[in-house]
Amino acid sequence: MTIKNTRPAPAKPATAISRMLAWGMVFMVLGCVAVPEGVTPVTDFELSRYLGRWYEIARLDHSFERGLVNVTAEYALEEDGRVRVINKGYRPAKEAWEIAQGVAAFVGATDVGRLKVSFFGPFYGGYNIIALDKVSYQYALVCGPSRPYLWILAREPQLDPAVTDTLVARARALGFATERLIMVDQTPVDRLSGSGG
């Protein structure tokens, strides 16, 4: 009986590691900090204004985020100048939050929105900010190292549909498959689970 009770315990760390690997799979597999051809990261970028919480408004589908809702990304400056990244999303099928932690650093000039992100070891993937509300840093359009990776982010759980439409049109003009965008459900979890108002 003691053996049966102790064997399942290691599954929890393994599950956590599996989730972290899944969230970072695209970056590990690609190991690429490229910018898609014909796409240019924003200039006059100010990291201090970009830090903090962002809500995922829309994304292209990936195995590492499939089924997640209430997805957020939190960016905080570390003492060594790198950026701590915490991605969080809720999986209704399991009624559980999934969290992945990583680090980001600039690729080149610090006033250009081109960074590299790692969620596991020395493997980095491109994080390219290709459209940004430079007035108040309230929304951003981000892509990975190639066109299958695209996100629309905002400071609030909902974004003005007109702004979303503008960002989608911009992405479409740059060759992204915007017809495949998934609009991310940001309904509060207590409402999703039926436990609150």
Image (cartoon, rainbow, N blue to C red):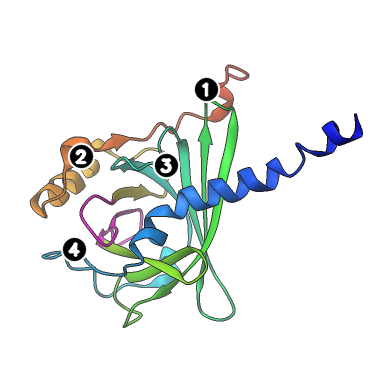
Q: Residue at x 34, y 43 (%)?
A: 62
Q: Which is nearer the N-term, disc 4 or disc 3?
A: 4
Q: Amino acid at mark 2?
A: Ala
Identify the mark at residue 162; answer none if there is no mark: 2
Looking at the image, is mark 3 or mark 2 earlier in the sequence?
Answer: 3
Other residues around mark 4 within 10 Å, as few (<14) / some (14–19) / many (≥20) = many
User: Residue 192, which numbered label?
Assistant: 1
- Residue 175 relative to residue 151: left or right: left
Find the magenta span and give its range.
130-149
Badge 1 vs badge 3, beta-carbon distance below 8 Å:
no
Q: CA distance from mark 2 to mark 4?
A: 26 Å
Q: CA distance from mark 1 to mark 4?
A: 36 Å
Q: Label 4 is placed on what type of residue?
A: Pro
- Above or below, 130 against 109 in this view is above
Mark nearest the camera among 1 and 4 is: 4
Q: Secondary structure at mark 4?
A: loop
Ranked by sequence position, the earlier of labels 2 and 4 is 4
Q: Position of residue 12 (x, y in %)?
A: 69, 42
Which of pointers 3 and 2 indicates the residue nearer the eye? 3
Helix, strand or loop at label 2? It is: helix
Percent of width and height locating residue 117 = 42, 66
- Assess whether mark 4 and mark 1 are in contact (beta carbons under 8 angstroms): no
Circle 4 sits on which residue? Answer: 36
Q: Is residue 142 magenta?
A: yes
Residues at circles 2 and 4 in contact by the CB criterion of under 8 Å: no
Nearer-the-camera pick, 128 or 61: 61
